[in-house]
Image: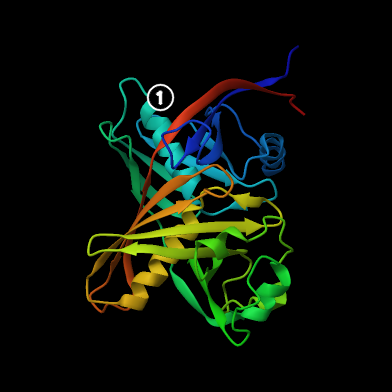
Amino acid sequence: MDTTIVLEYATVDVFTTTPFKGNQLAVVHIPTSTQLTQSTKQVIAREFNFSETVFLHEAEPETSERRLDIFTINAELPFAGHPVIGAICHVCQSSNPPLGAVTLKTKAGDLVGRYNKGTGLAEAEIPHQVRVHRAKVPAKALLASQSGVSSRVDLGSAYPIVSIVKGMTFILTQMEDLEALGRLQAAAQRLEREEVELDDGWEPSFVAPYYYVALQRTNEVTKIRSRMMEPSIGEDPCTGSAATSLAAYLSLQDGGEGRTYAYIVEQGVEMGRAGDIHVKVTLDDTGKAVRKVVLAGSAVLIMKGTLYLPQA
């Protein structure tokens, strides 16, 4: 008797409308009749070898809610930006007729994704627990891990550590200009973990530096160029969780009761996979905390296929 599990999958490029740009994502469809173990999902994610692979569970009867499990090649994540936007676009675009909204249940919380068929943009108010940690990362520690960082950096300076949710943390590193951003080496060494001190209760967490340059600021939007590197995945083309962490931090620095700030973060340029990440951050009535974070972007279908999984 054939015991092979057959699963349909698709790959999409996220935060772009141009094939082979933006960030790759594998979407594996899981029917309600199929149960996969964590280890099996991890093996599949390693097989695709993208920065993230998602497992999109079929909606339960009489509901549109879809469970979304997000995996890197090494571990499951509670939340990540490009998997969420890619999943929203894929579900809404591939439905017949196309959907305008879908509810995704992630480990970080539920979110409602909306899709605009006219613009091709998906957006979601994402779960957030924005935390600017008390400690910072000394510049000298960053120099030790990233040879591309200019030796002109003030060794007495330090960079903020910010989490968008528990488990997703970034060291926000502002570079002096685009030339400095371009000198960064994708083959960076892992930052010594003892140099990154998170507040109590915020471990364990994925932690990576997020390098950026502010390009232009108007009353309507702030434009930023960024890069994200982490030794276990190399350079990531477009990192929604990092972009939302940066946008939340910059908004808190500006403050203002109930203010909303808009950002377009361009990432992946240096590696030939440019994409645009759209973020809006709304502060609460005190101007000292984040009320809402909206992440938006597009995605383009690249391929569809069938995964054959021997059943244990």
Name above or below for residue 35 compared with residue 94. Answer: below
- Where does the C terminus fall, quadrant-wise? top right
Secondary-structure class at tag 1: helix
The spot of residue 72 in percent (x, y) is: 63, 47
* Whether residue 168 can be seen here: no
Residue type at the position of mark 1: Ser
Name the residue: 73% across, 18% down: 3
| Residue 260, placed above or below residue 298 | below
In front of the other: 273 or 101: 273
Where is residue 33, by image quadrant? top right
Which residue is found at the position 32% from the left and 25% from the top? 98
Residue that lies at the very extreme toward the front in this rendered image: 179
In the visual, does 179 lie left or right of 18?
right
The percent coordinates of residue 187 (x first, y second) are 72, 56
Q: Is residue 102 above or below residue 170?
A: above
Task: Please tell me which residue is depicted at 68% across the width and 74% down the height of the picture.
Answer: 143
**Vertical placement of residue 54 versus 28, above or below:** below
**Which is nearer the eye, 45 or 3?**
45
- The x, y position of residue 291, in whole percent, is 30, 67
Residue 156 seen from this side? yes
Q: Which residue in the rendered view is the most extreme toward the top?
A: 1
Label 1, on which residue? 94
| Number of residue marks | 1
